[in-house]
């Protein structure tokens, strides 16, 4: 009996949609969990708004809710 092929690991994501923060205008983003992700773009394009004001704030909110 041949060994079964290993199952592909299901990738999990942080899903964000409808983000409206400073320069971000109703964007939709999927960021893979467990991966190193880089946010890049020109000055004023919303990189910091996405990374700090959206992702960080959501992480804090979920942590507080879990207590």
Image (cartoon, rainbow, N blue to C red):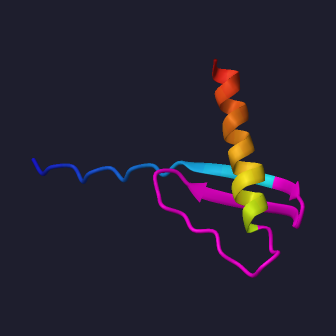
Left or right of 21, for residue 39: left
Left or right of 58, for residue 5: left
Q: Position of residue 34 (x, y in %)?
A: 46, 51
Name the residue: 53% across, 48% down. Answer: 12
The magenta segment is: 18-46
Image height of 22 relative to 58, above or below:
below
Q: Which residue is at the front of the view, 11 or 45? A: 45
Image height of 27 relative to 60, above or below:
below
Name the residue: 78% across, 79% down. Answer: 43
Name the residue: 72% across, 41% down. Answer: 58
Left or right of 53, for residue 33: left
Quarter occupied by the C terminus: top right
Q: Position of residue 18 (x, y in %)?
A: 85, 54
The image quarter containing residue 19 is bottom right
The image quarter containing residue 38 is bottom right
Q: How many marks on residues?
A: 0
Q: Position of residue 15 (x, y in %)?
A: 68, 50
Q: Which residue is at the front of the view, 1 or 34? A: 34
Name the residue: 75% across, 82% down. Answer: 42
């Amino acid at each position: 009996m041949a060994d079964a092929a290993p199952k592909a690991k299901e990738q999990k994501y942080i899903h964000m949609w409808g983000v409206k923060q400073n320069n971000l205008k109703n964007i939709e983003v999927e960021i893979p969990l467990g991966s190193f992700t880089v946010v890049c773009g020109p000055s004023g394009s919303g990189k910091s708004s996405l990374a700090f004001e959206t992702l960080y704030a959501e992480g804090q909110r979920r942590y507080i809710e879990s207590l």
